[in-house]
Image (cartoon, grey):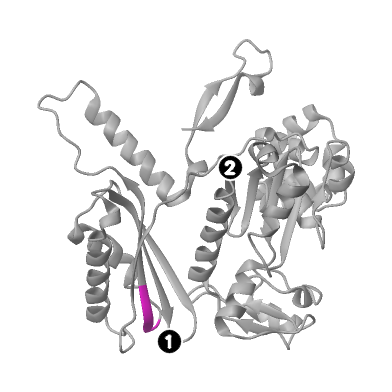
Amino acid sequence: MLIALALNRLPLAIALAARGTSMSAGTPVALGPLPLGEPRIGMPSAGAEATGIRSGMSLAEALTLCPGLVLVPPDPAGVQARAARLISDIQALGLPVEEVSPGRVLIDSAPGLRLHGGPQRLVERLVTVAPGESLQLGAAPARFAALMAARLARRRPRILAASDVPEALASLSVQLLHEDGGVPKRVCETLMLVGIGRLGGLASLSRLAVRDRLGVAGLAAWRMARGEDGSQIVAQDPSFLLTAELRPGEPIATDAALEQAVSVLLERALADPARNGREPRLVRLSAHLVTGESWLCEAPLREACGEHRRLQLALMQKARRLPAPAERLAVVLAEFAPGSRQLALLDPAGRERRESLDEAASQIRAALGESALLRVIELAPQSRLPEHRYGLAPR
């Protein structure tokens, strides 16, 4: 059984908390566009959704539909910090966890059932990881079904048995296959064009018909709609981060001041004894702007590096896009690798190539996540069905 945990409307809640404002339940509120980004709104509140506002809608269209819409500046740094704390709190309970999106995770309940005294006690412990926040909990035997159970949950956790999954998912939109299941958008658009707008309609089709018309991606969508997409998660290892923060007396408004501040922050982070000689593969800069917004940028490195000058060069290429003067800056070092490795006098054949491939793979994971790089494995090579012969697994 998989448990899906979601902090309801986390980006909007973090943005409202950062501004120190509170809105009534019926007030139409939405996240404003990112600084220097496209003029599109972010996550809307329930009151805004009732007027037809949707995430990703153009700003002009949203204000036409709802002239009283209140826009709140987004806080991506705050969202990332809260999402990281959520994962850390769940891992502290001894549970494997996989992040689906910031504030939404999948948890394998099997290791925690005996540890916490059964399903009811386990759910009670999970509720404590987000006290006072709007928490949605759902459970089901399959990944996509668990995420949908969390969407359907209201005041109490929604638990779906295998026999309940088809009926519970039947009335949901096929668009959720793209939003939560990672199915290509073209597959959902094709289904909508032929009049299949609900998951129940997709689940009622034959497997061969879906495969012949929509291919492998369509077959994956069909399995999700039927609750047959498996219960395996890619558990995340506890992440080790080094953070250095700077609060200057005056806002940082020039490139020279920004470069000097980044240099000081990198020196502090690299000098931290907790680093223990390890070298980061990812550098992150977050800033709180004088406008009340936050800003975030990341610089994945081609290879793990602990040199101050190289880290500063990599980070400043992104940091110069800072959209407004910053009142507070923070540098985070992540994705650490062992440093100061002893070099052999004569390298074995192929070692340099293997190390280059490993570094490239690590760079891809640091930039795009663990699921961005998979390997093909044999499942049933003698099967007469091509899709049963091979599968994908984390590299």
Where does label 1 land, which residue? Answer: 290
Q: Nearer the viewer, residue 239 or 329?
A: 239
Kindly identify the amino acid type of the residue bearing the numbered disc 1.
Val
- How far separated are the C-alphas under marks 1 and 2? 39 Å
Neighbour tally class for label 2: few under 14, some 14-19, many 20 plus, Cα within 10 Å: many
Q: Which residues are magenta?
A: 324-329
Name which residue lies at 21% across and 58% down: 310
Question: Which quadrant of the figure has residue 297?
Answer: bottom left
Query: Image check: 19 left or right of 312?
Result: right
Residue 393 vertical position relative to residue 199 in the rendered view, above or below: above
Residue 294 vertical position relative to residue 143 in the rendered view, above or below: below
Q: Nearer the viewer, mark 1 or mark 2?
A: 2
Kindly identify the amino acid type of the residue bearing the numbered disc 2.
Pro
Name which residue lies at 38% across and 83% down: 327
Residue 366 vertical position relative to residue 40 in the rendered view, above or below: above
For the image shown, how many numbered marks are present on the structure? 2
- Determine the main secondary structure of the stretch shown in magenta: strand
Residue 390 badge = none
Mark 1 or mark 2: name the one nearer the start of the chain.
2
Q: What percent of the width, then of the height, locates residue 170?
A: 87, 46
Q: What percent of the width, then of the height, locates residue 386?
A: 64, 20
* Quarter containing the N terminus: top right
Q: What percent of the width, then of the height, locates residue 240?
A: 40, 52
Residue 36 vertical position relative to residue 154 in the rendered view, above or below: below
| Residue 125 seen anywhere in this rendered image of the structure | yes
Q: Nearer the viewer, residue 366 or 121?
A: 121
Where does label 2 land, which residue? Answer: 96
